[in-house]
Amino acid sequence: MIYLNGDFMPIEEARIPVLDRGFIFGDGVYEVIPVYSRKPFRLAEHLRRLQHSLDGIRLLNPHSGKEWSRLVEQIIAGNESDDQSLYLHVTRGVAKRDHAFPKGVRPTVFIMSNPLPAPPRELLATGVAVVTTNDNRWLRCDIKAISLLPNVLLRQMAIDAGAIETVLLRDGFMTEGAASNIFVVKNEILLAPPKNHLMLPGITYDVVLELAAANKIRHEVRAVSEYEVRTAQELLLTSSTKEIMPITRLDGKSVGDGKPGPIFAMLYQLYQNYKITVMRGSAAF
Ligand code: PMP
């Protein structure tokens, strides 16, 4: 069951007009929210980031926090899996094709849900391969825009090379992955690039840094150089659907000793425990 502009329906019945500015211009923003045991994970944070994205494209939020929460609840209840990945999407609506903002147009609001499988155990045990390339995206990567053509092309580079993600480098520094954030372990310190206009402020990224701080894992938030990426002891990838994954190959070469490392193992376990406490409603943060 999906939600589209006020109605709930099976996805097969959902239709949008071809003049929707999401279709014509990619003029919209989105969120992906993981749901565990039918509870949305970090909903308030995802809704805050949605507001940041809407502000970034100068589109009024069509719903209050309460309304979004209610819609999210209804979609979760209307779908089968206990663990789901929710996709929320808002576009500037339907209007005659013209770049300038239309006046008096209602935004299009769409929510769908897919089952959210746990990251495959084999991949957690062996780690995943990534490739690197230059980050050729625009300079507002902090907006979670639906216009994802650069990210699509960048992710496909990884797939074509038999890898799962492309790590992006800009002016000698790492920004993020095509659809994930990247952490580096160097000299036993977890390094994370600072949030700015060059990367998406990941919700999982925040959880990882909070867990590191709460558990006295040494960490620094600062610019991470290409050299540090290439000589890392460990590399980690995070996203709402992939959680935390170990990267063990970079551009065909082993990362560290080529096996998932101790910082990954620690953070992975902390993340799983944290999810369980959140689902029980007793998390400290
Ligand atoms: N960066 C990009 C470009 C992304 O698309 C995503 C999410 N798919 C992330 C980072 C990770 O963000 P989150 O942890 O909120 O899923």
Image (cartoon, rainbow, N blue to C red):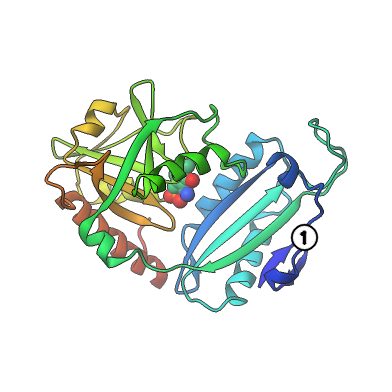
Q: Quadrant of the C terminus?
A: bottom left
Nearest the viewer among 206 and 254 is 254
Instruction: Choose top left, top right, bottom left or bottom right for residue 68.
Output: bottom right
Which x, y percent locates residue 279?
41, 70
- Residue 122 sits above or below residue 109 on the image: below
Residue type at the position of mark 1: Asn
- Residue 143 sits above or below residue 4 on the image: above
Which x, y percent locates residue 244?
32, 54
**Residue at screen point 13% across, 35% down:** 187
Residue that mark 1 sits on: 5
> Image check: 135 left or right of 211?
right
**Residue at screen point 34% across, 35% down:** 132
**Residue at screen point 83% across, 33% down:** 98
Which x, y percent locates residue 18?
80, 50
List the single residue furthest toward the top. 171
- Residue 22 sits above or below residue 271 on the image: above
> What secondary structure is found at the residue carrying circle 1?
loop
Q: Quadrant of the N terminus?
A: bottom right
Count of labels in the image = 1
Nearest the viewer among 189 and 277 is 189
The crowding category of the residue bearing disc 1, from other C-alpha atoms within 10 Å (few below 14, some 14 to 19, many at least 20), is few
Nearest the viewer among 150 and 277 is 150
> Image check: 180 left or right of 51?
left
List the single residue furthest toward the bottom. 80
**Residue at screen point 35% across, 33% down:** 193
- Residue 42 sits above or below residue 189 on the image: below
List the single residue furthest toward the front. 160
Instruction: Choose top left, top right, bottom left or bottom right for residue 186.
Output: top left
Residue 202 seen in the current view: no
Which x, y percent locates residue 198?
47, 30
